[in-house]
Image: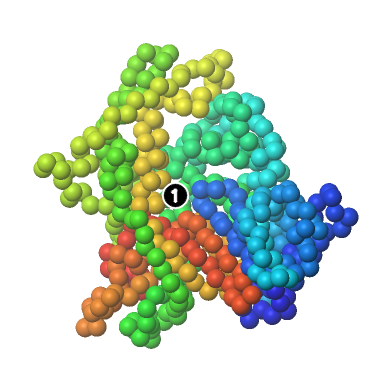
Amino acid sequence: MDQANNTKGFILNAVTINSERNIVPVDITGIVSDIQFFEHLDKPYVTGNIVISDSVRLYDRLDIQGAEEVIIEMQMNLDGPKVRRKFYITKIKVAQKTNETTEMVALNIADDWLFRSTTKNVNKAFSGSPDSIIAQIAEEYLGLEVVREGNFVFQNEMKVIVPNLTPLQAIMWIRQRATTDDGMPFYVYNDFITNRLNISDVVTLTSQVPYNRRKPFLYGVTDALVVDETQHAYLPIKAYKVKDVQNMLSLVDKGLISSTHSFFHTSHNKIRNHSFNIQKDVFDRVELDRSKSYKFSQEFKIDDENITNLGSRKISRISSSGPFEIGATANYKSYSEETDPSDHIRKITARAMRHFLVKDPISIRVDGKAFIRGDYNMTIGNCVRLLFLANRPNTTSGGTKLDMSKSGDYVVYSSKHTFSLTRYDVELECVKIASYNDEGSMLT
């Protein structure tokens, strides 16, 4: 790649490969043709691909075996901050000849701490709140900083014995136990820009003000909107895709719309029953802005009965009680234990919201310029505003010009950064739990 040319939206300063078998790091910047990075809200690490056009026998001379260190450094422009990231090669995805003297080699890469985590084993007791335990594991085993955002974790003093997991597996296992007071789930994730783990709850993520509120991403011809009145500028969406969405049947099948749950406490020999209703146990717990409504209707009925009252599934769980009761002032809850039996409801609420969040995703592709900033993440975990023009915009005074189903404020759930010889694109998978009631709220 041409390091000096930043008309494509980025400057690739260096790509080097190093291992204990090499005397010095090998700079492969000049033969790199494509780089991709993948981020995900449900994964505390970044993965990627590097494609090289090898005409200098690099592939056979380096003898790549799948544990080599890769350092990538890039920036948006010559004056901008640099992004420097360490990866490890996890495998050679493909290698094939393109002509007699050149070979195309694609390498899969993964974060430094994902590779190191895979080599470690955690068999140890931890105590504290779920977020503090996550921070302990991240610091002790991976040397990572954990940044907490948003609401407090409801589960406070608990004690767990990590059962033979890698550090990252242990972190995700503990994360499943964390909820807010309203039962909203937490996410632990990492982005391409920062070398840290972020912990945030779904309400904090979805209630953010979109960072592009004054410059939304738009699909369609801008002449259909009165730009002079709204004082908006628009960034074009190059392409979008909606696929496998609105899977209500799957949610019903999993018991996430309506179900009956039984929690059996072994030491007290008691059963706590709860009739779960997604409207009462999820949506009514979190109040939305008046301009929005949840993307869920209570009007659906089966055999004249509302689907939120059907009790489609019966689910039973056994919970240990009091294994760490060691005195009047030094008691800890175990992993699945709750002091008040009613607190088990938060487990169901969190699982339902986690699935509901990804019920209606949309994927967009936009220009990547300005996405590389050495000090700020602009992809996963952020809120963005997307506008889609209606297929037949109503041009009369007060008429709707936007597709109200697709348009709205979304949380970036996953992203793919693609750096090529000619351009830099970003694909964003975006999710939302609510839609605006009118287009005026999106254009102010």
Q: Quadrant of residue 3?
A: bottom right
Residue drawn 16% across and 45% down? 301
**Residue under pointer 1:** 202
Q: Is residue 269 above or below residue 16?
A: above
Q: Secondary structure at mark 1?
A: helix
- Which of 367 and 309 lies nearest the eye of the viewer? 367
* Residue that lies at the very extreme toward the front in this rendered image: 100
Q: Is residue 317 above or below residue 17?
A: above
Query: Looking at numbered disc 1 in the image, what kind of residue is underneath it?
Result: Val
The image shows residue 407 at horizontal and vertical percentages of: 35, 67
- Which of 8 and 274 lies nearest the eye of the viewer? 8
- Which of 58 and 419 lies nearest the eye of the viewer? 58
Left or right of 401? Residue 52 is right
Residue drawn 76% across and 66% down? 28
Q: Is residue 393 above or below residue 286?
A: below
Q: Quadrant of residue 214?
A: bottom left
Q: Is residue 208 visible?
A: no
